[in-house]
Image (cartoon, grey):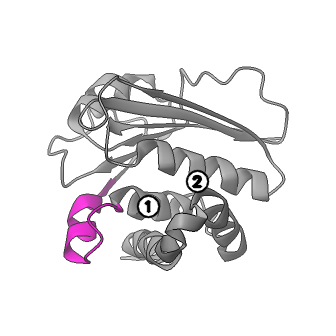
Amino acid sequence: MSTTQFLFAGFGGQGILFAGKFAAYKGLTEGKQVSWLPSYGPEMRGGTASCGVIIGDEPVGSPIVSKPDVLIAMNLPSLDRYESAVVPGGMIFLDSTLIERKVKREDVKVYAIPATQLADENGMPTLANMIMMGSILKALDNFNEDSVNAALGKVISARHADMLETNLKALTMGAKFLEG
């Protein structure tokens, strides 16, 4: 029996809610119990955005993630706000393109992924979130191509079906980044 609590945080326009929804659908495709709770400011772009995702073997009692096992910080204000909330032994993934400071805690595993830089350099400027997701799945040893494809099929609308391959490429890029 295991449950993992994820907290995705950044600013509007970074695909925070999309990445969280992808993680939730990936859990669903694997037969897990899932909760996805988005939160965002009133601004469309540039405001705050976060979402909590809980994936486990047991029914989820509360969708609120106050002590994440995994924090995904896509900007400095998010790292500043949530770093202390991560459970000891947890993981912090940060976009090192946008966050220059080091994580202050020594009781967590830190992954600095230059997601925005990688996205820009590879002609996919809106997919830093999915590059980050690929790194997360790799670090958790959960990059299963079948469930990744199934989840992408759920979160990418038919209108944007042309983005399926690009999203898969971004996920793979993030996974390969951790391989070095």
Do the CB atoms of the residues marked 2 and 1 lie less than 8 Å apart? yes
Q: Which element is circle 2 on?
A: helix
Q: Residue furthest left?
A: 100
Q: Residue 35, how many percent across, how many down?
A: 69, 34
Residue identified by numbered label 2? 22
User: In the image, what residue occupies the spot 55% across and 61% down?
Assistant: 137
Spot occupied by residue 25 in the image (x, y as percentages of width and height) = 68, 52
Query: Is 10 left or right of 50, judged from the image as shown?
Result: left
Residue 4 lies, in percent from the top left, at 65, 40
Within-10-Å neighbours for mark 2: few <14, some 14–19, many 20+: many
**What span is in magenta?**
112-127
**Number of labelled discs?**
2
Residue type at mark 2 is Phe
Kindly identify the amino acid type of the residue bearing the numbered disc 1. Met
Q: Position of residue 114 (x, y in %)?
A: 25, 61
On the question of residue 87 being in view, the answer is no
Q: Is residue 125 magenta?
A: yes
Residue 117, placed above or below residue 7: below
